[in-house]
Image (spheres, coloured by chain):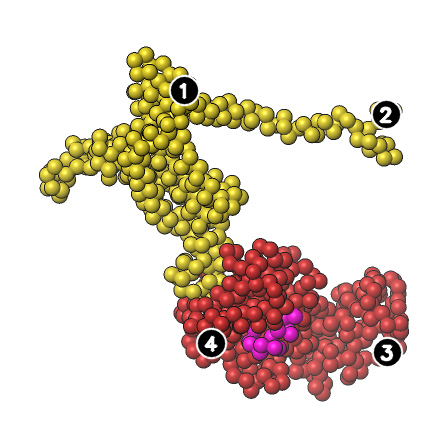
Chain colours: A yellow, B red
Amino acid sequence: MEQSVPAHHSRSVKPPRHRGLWAKRLAPYLLSLPAGLWLALLFLVPLFLMLSETLKSCSPASGVCTMTWNWGELPHTVNLYRTQFITSLLFALFATVIDLVISFPIAYWIAFYGGRRKNFFLIMLLVPFFVSFVIRTLVWEFILSDNGFLFSFLHHHHLVPAGFHVLGTSVAVVAGLAYNYLPFTALPLYVAIERIDHRVLDAAHDLYANRRVAFMKVILPLTIPGIFAAFLLTFIPAFGDYINQEILGGTSNTMIGTVIQNSFLVNADYPAGSSLSVVLLAISLIGIFAYARVLGSRTIEEYL
Amino acid sequence: MSGTLGLSEDERTRAPEGLTSRKVVVCFDHVTKIFDEAPAVDDLNLEIHEGEFFSLLGPSGCGKTTSLRMLGGFEEPTSGRLLLGGDDVTYQAPYRRDVNTVFQSYALFPHLDVFENVAFGLRRQKISRAQIKSKVSEMLEIVDLPNFERRRPSQLSGGQQQRVALARALVNEPTLLLLDEPMSALDAKLRRQMQVELKRIQARVGITFLYVTHDQEEAMTMSDRLAVMRHGKIEGIGSPKDVYDSPSTEFVATFLGASNLLAGTVTGTEGSCSLVRLSDGTTLRVPTSRTPQGVGAIKVGVRPEKISLVESGVEASNVTNVLTGQVRVSTFTGVGNQYLVATPAGVEVTVYAQNIGHGVVPRSGDQVTLTWPVEHTFAVVPMSGAELEEQVDEGEL
């Protein structure tokens, strides 16, 4: 017989009350429902729509696309836009390496010598990035343009050869990418360096390691998870970026992001755009799995 | 500070038997270190001998860790010289010094396993792989951690981490090993066990140890000699027994163990004793060799365990001091009884009596007579009021 006595009043062992038990079991699912719905509606559904789009064929005349289970679209588009994939890969790689080289000393300095002003320095690093991505890139276009103040000055004083320009070249795109994704490199690096116990550096010096050896044998190995995280966080968005190329680049150095954007918005070739997106996604996932494989999935959570 | 340099003159600074003849490994020569205009170490002079287990003891902020860090090369002295085995190392980089450190937090390399942690220093030298392997294995044997080579520091307990830190430093066979409060992260039981262990290891490897701690019991248990520091200066130095039995200052008397201190005035001498009159007129005798000279107002000290409680009828003589009083509090502590006795001079005297079944066991309110041998009496210059207040603050830390 069910008694309506609170649990702590009953002296004998009683089967747990069913309602409480169910509530307990359901609570985690109920709590994860909003996030689950969010993921399902805004991630899984679009993902499947995109995947199914790659298997459709469109008639160029009417623009109507029908499901034809045409698996050939994937290798076809990859093959067709191989140059753009390689360009994107190289641009993103250069930009990421430049960011790592620039960010490491900054992050190291803030983490080790920032003292009480660490947060101030971090905010100083981030302030430019409070401005919208597109506006920042447009400002770079303004700075780098042939008749902008920088190049007017350089040309006027004959500091550069006549006809020298940066806007529209690969250099401008890589520089724009490097600039725009700098915080994605600097912050994970900072987190990794900041958590290094400074006393291990003392210990390394104590054990006959000079500054160079202490850096190579202690600081660098302890920063590797951060370097890897910084690499992924910078490389993946830079790989798929199209704004920088669009605004700062020319016609000869199209990146894959621009091709995807054009497929969807200009050519209305959804299967082609979807196929390219799927390939892009696959490359990114391979990167993340490689990271998890090498450094363990727990470190990803710590940095992302 | 008098008594810090004059090893030959002052009895208190003399090393225990056999050590005086050994060569000096460490020498602080008028070393001062100033942080933000405040001296952390103030004109420190200190010599440590080869093979010695030497402790720097003091409350936090007394300059003991700064002294150690200067020897390790992690801080540069503001002035003065540091000698290591006769060489001036004052401004030498830490990685060039033949000194290794066991850090307070161990500072093990988290990305390396136990073997690589211990081998780190050896790998920086020109030593063959085979030799490194045998040295590391031997050292892990000594610290009682065989078969732990492939563990990561994060997989070890606090005590095990400490042993790795010790092995990592000792395997390099340095001239001097620095230990910066290495026991502070261990629980009391493990700490006592490690004290014995550390002493055993030191005896086995024969390396000079400089041990920094705020734990007076730890320092007394392990050290051949110790120095009590305060405000960047050494207040007392010598073997634990010497420093304990005849503390040189009021601070040393209260920091190193417990002391009863009774204020009085020196009235004269009688034989080898100085006579000190307390405020109630009682006269106590103190060996003149332990009485500060040239000051009238002093404090007479006696350790609580040196005092015997008797009912009455004992007279003061030139070998015995006598006080009377009333028991205020009597506490049974298992190993003995602790009494707080109010004396006519207005000071409460603490007495420890061992629980060995004889002697009187008075209760609160009883009138008692306290006696102790003159040879166990010492005298110190009283601290100023400001110093006393400060000490109370330090005591609360």
Q: Position of residue B84 (x, y in %)?
A: 47, 76
Reading the image, the residue beneath label 4 is B84
Q: Amino acid at mark 3?
A: Val
Q: Amino acid at mark 4?
A: Leu
Q: CA distance from mark 4 to mark 2?
A: 81 Å
Q: Closer to the N terminus: mark 4 or mark 3?
A: 4
Q: CA distance from mark 2 to mark 1?
A: 64 Å
**Which is more toward the observer, B394 or A290?**
A290
Reading the image, the residue beneath label 2 is A3
- Type of secondary structure dominating the magenta stretch: helix
Q: For the point 49% across and 72% down, which residue is it?
A: B130
Task: Give the foreground label among 3 and 1.
Answer: 1
Reading the image, the residue beneath label 3 is B314
**Which is more toward the observer, B49 or A33?**
A33
Q: Is residue B295 in sight in this rendering? A: no
Reading the image, the residue beneath label 1 is A68
Q: Amino acid at mark 2?
A: Gln
Task: Give the foreground label among 2 and 1.
Answer: 1
**Which is more toward the observer, A110 or B254?**
A110
Q: CA distance from mark 4 to mark 3?
A: 55 Å
